Structure formats: structure tokens, C-alpha cells
Amino acid sequence: MVRLLQQAPTFAEFFASCLLSQNIRLEEALTDQLLNSCEKRLARALLLMAGVGREGNFEATIPKLHQETLAEMIGTSRQRVNYFMRKFRRLGFVEYDGCPQHKLLVHGSLFDIVLKI
């Protein structure tokens, strides 16, 4: 690996870029876990998975995940995820039905939760 990094500067630059972006994502996740409520963490996770906000995308569909999976991702209980998902749906931030094989539509308006102080 060291030889490859020394002999291929383009690859070395790409590799360093990947390492730095991974480090940034880890720092963001740690900061999110330490400073934000589980409601904000859930909203952020949904927005990141959907890619909402990138390239002018204001709504996107993601495969519907089990609430247990979402709870593990944000460090809370399934019951809390259920509560917030119902709240997000009631407020029109997300759209989904009860079938697990269907998709979850995430609207850009969910940013309101993340930006709320």
C-alpha cells in the first residue's frame, strides 16, 4: 500500500480525499450524537439517506427502513422513532404507508426540524 501511494500520486490524492471525507462524516456523527436531540438526529439521518438538499433536490424517496434500524442508527428506542415518524408524517415532512415494502418520501421541509433551535 505504501509503495502504491508513493508510485501513484493520483491514487494517493484520491485515497487521502476518501480518508478525510470519512473522518469528517465521523466527526459530524459524533457531534450530532452529543449535541442534538433524537428528533433532530432522526431528521438529519433521513435527510442524509435521501440526499435532500444536494443538487437542488427538495424531496427524495428512500427504501422504508424498520424502526429498529433507525433507532440503532440514531441511538434511541424504537418507540421514540415511532413517535417522531408519526409527528413528521402529521406535519407533512415525510410520506409513507404501513406496508414495509413501500418507500419513504422525505420532503426538504424536514430541514425545519434540523434547523430548529
Image: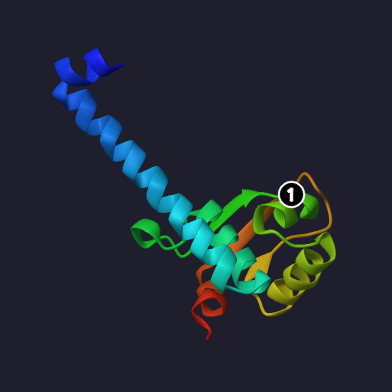
- Return the x and y of residue 37 as percentages of the image width and height: 63, 74
The picture quadrant where one finds residue 87 is bottom right
**What scheme was used to colour the molecule?**
rainbow
The picture quadrant where one finds residue 70 is bottom right
**On the rendered structure, is 3 left or right of 21?**
left
Tell which of 36 and 55 is nearer to you. 36
As displayed, is residue 7 above or below residue 25?
A: above
Q: How many marks?
A: 1
- Return the x and y of residue 11 as percentages of the image width and height: 23, 24
Tell which of 100 and 82 is nearer to you. 82
Report the residue marked by disc 1: 69
- Return the x and y of residue 1 as percentages of the image width and height: 31, 16
As displayed, is residue 33 above or below residue 7?
A: below
Q: Residue at x 80, y 72 (%)?
A: 83
Tell which of 20 and 96 is nearer to you. 20
- Return the x and y of residue 44 as percentages of the image width and height: 55, 64
**On the rendered structure, is 113 left or right of 12?**
right
Query: Which class describes the residues within 10 Å of circle 1: few (<14), some (14-19), or many (20+)?
Result: few
As displayed, is residue 4 above or below residue 50?
A: above
Q: Residue at x 38, y 58 (%)?
A: 54
Q: Residue at x 79, y 68 (%)?
A: 80
**On the rendered structure, is 50 left or right of 13?**
right
Q: Residue at x 74, y 68 (%)?
A: 85
Residue at the far front in the pictured view: 2
Q: Secondary structure at mark 1?
A: helix
Question: What amino acid is at disc 1?
Answer: Thr
